[in-house]
Image (cartoon, rainbow, N blue to C red):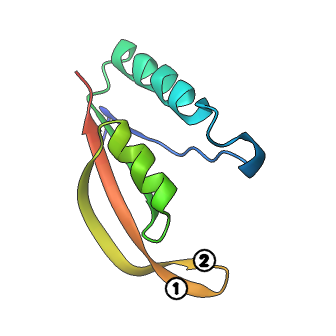
Amino acid sequence: AKRFTAVLGISIAKPYRKLGLGSILYNVLEKMAKERKIDTIESSYYANNKPSEIFHKKMGFKYVGRVPRNIDYYGERVDETFVCKKVK
């Protein structure tokens, strides 16, 4: 069982991007995870989603793998990138 793992999913509407909202939401989530003794946060994103890649790196996530053609992105099959972060 993954009792000590949380799965992160954040989506920010285009008009509200670049305002720091994703970072604020993530910081709240990480604080909650620590309070609940969660030690790992997992996330994934479309491999062609550069802003999401940058966000996850900024938040300290590490690349753990990729599943080829795992997501349907507007009719196109794209890879899914998996990342995780150990919470201290």
32, above or below 15, in the image: above
The front one of 58 and 88 is 58
Find residue 73 and name its label. 2
Give the secondary structure at mark 2: strand
Amino acid carrying mark 2 in the image: Tyr
Q: Is residue 1 visible?
A: no
Q: Is residue 69 left or right of residue 87?
A: right
Residue lying furthest bottom in this view?
A: 76
44, above or below 20, in the image: below
The front one of 65 and 13 is 13
* Residue 26 position within the rendered picture, expressed as x and y whole percent measured from the top left: 49, 30
Amino acid carrying mark 1 in the image: Arg
Q: Is residue 55 left or right of residue 18?
A: left
* Residue 76 position within the rendered picture, expressed as x and y whole percent measured from the top left: 58, 87
The front one of 35 and 79 is 79
Give the secondary structure at mark 1: strand
